[in-house]
Image: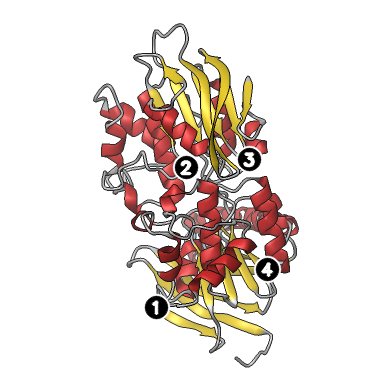
Amino acid sequence: MSNNNSILKFDEVTFNFGPNNPIMTGASFSLRRGAKITLMGQNGAGKSTLFKLLTDVYEPEEGRIIKDPKLTIALSRQVIPRDELDFTVQEFFQALFTNQIYALDPMIKEVLEVVNLPLEDYTKKIKEFSGGQQARLLLASALIQKPDLLLLDEPTNNLDKAGIDHLTDFIKSYNKTVIVISHDADFLNSFTEGVLYLDVYSRTIDHYVGNYLKVLEQIKIRVEKERSKNARLEKSIQEKKDKANFFANKGGRLRAVAKKMREVAADDEENKVDVYKEDRTIRPFKIPMQKDWTGEIIKIDSFTRLKDGKVQTCKAEISMRKGQRLLLVGPNGIGKSTLLERLASGEAPGEKIADGVNVGYYRQDFSTLNFEDTVFESLHGVMASSDEHELRSTASSFLIGSDLIYNKIGTLSEGQKGLVAFARLVLQKPGLLILDEPTNHINFRHLPVIAKALDDYEGAMIIVSHVPEFLEQIEINETLDLNK
């Protein structure tokens, strides 16, 4: 490329999903070598599409994407595809390369050390790793390719604080270019030098310079200016329309004046700008508790954990009734998700869920959802009744309208899958909630609404979350630290 400091340029790029779904229209920006960039935009603005354009999954319909001829790009995905969960670690990394890599094990060892995931057995299957460990494997899968441009899509999902701190340090020290999609403001602000903002209304890309919080302030100032401009134009338009109507009623030569004023008003309408709007937020909701339940809901006398490479059994004295909330804590890989899965299935040694208790289970990998079901089928499957009005009303409150209700679960974004999972809990009316990282993939604007619903829930609740700001909004009665 002509600019030695620039590795990539979007030049008037246009891309559409069909004739009625434009994503980008004449979008332009350039990316300099070594930049640390945040990619922002409302839901549906095209953040994932931009990543796919960068990685040649999609091609622009108009315009050009100009790249340095030697540029290498790697994407750290949000989740590991289900068809790769039965891969061994070795197979998982080999699948990234078109050719057989014979010195693969030393390369795996190097990147696993970078992501702070020491591992000796490369025949271990991906599905045997915790959510946090899988998040590290996803990052390592991008790093092993040693890209000039590293694309990170929600990389903090499932990571504990130590994992996020480690990732932050890595991004800061990485001497190549990084673009990150994330809803974690503190994480983004720690390394961001600029923001690419995808405007869902103008279908263009604005490039801001500065750290994340400063850019948010710049966007806020821009919004205020745009709103003021539109307000002035609205006033001017109305005045011209009123005068045009007055002159038109006078007749004669004044009709020509009226016509001219209407043309000027029309020009003013064209000069109005589409003001940045926030994503829609889900409506406040309530998770009803199973009716007519009294007494003990769950009792835990012991639990197992994985520590220092060994499975250990620990004693406990936990008895939960209505309104009680238990928080499980501990580092990635110690067995929090495994314990929740066993509790939900009723197969955990040392625990007993009372007969008849309806368990609502939210899994971080959404494996409680059948990806071949439509959204309608998934929601209907957990209902005791067949009240379609209740189903559709609940779905609508989670931004699942008629345009999505008959889509297959597997076609939804990760965030939309999370909202379907919460809608199922509302319709299920459980007596016990088991929640494994319920903030993962969820738009940060929805989180206060979800936290309020969980805090108001009247049944028993067991939760795992690495987001302290979220947990602070929920009253917790007891904490079980699996590391102690």
Q: Residue 98 — which label?
A: 1
- Percent x, y for residue 150? 58, 70
Q: Which residue is denoted by mark 4 in the rendering?
A: 36
Q: Secondary structure at mark 2?
A: loop
Q: How is the image coloured?
A: secondary structure
Q: Is residue 101 above or below residue 185?
A: below
Measured Cα–Cα span from mark 4 to mark 3: 24 Å
Q: Is residue 221 above or below residue 131?
A: below
Q: Which residue is denoted by mark 3 in the rendering?
A: 467
Q: Can residue 323 be seen from the camera position used here?
A: no
Residue found at the far bottom of this picture? 2
Please identify the quarter of the rendering in which residue 365 is found.
top left
Nearer to the camera, 391 or 465: 465
Q: Nearer the viewer, mark 1 or mark 3?
A: 1
Callout 4 crowding tier (Cα within 10 Å): few <14, some 14–19, many ≥20:
many
- Percent x, y for residue 284? 51, 30
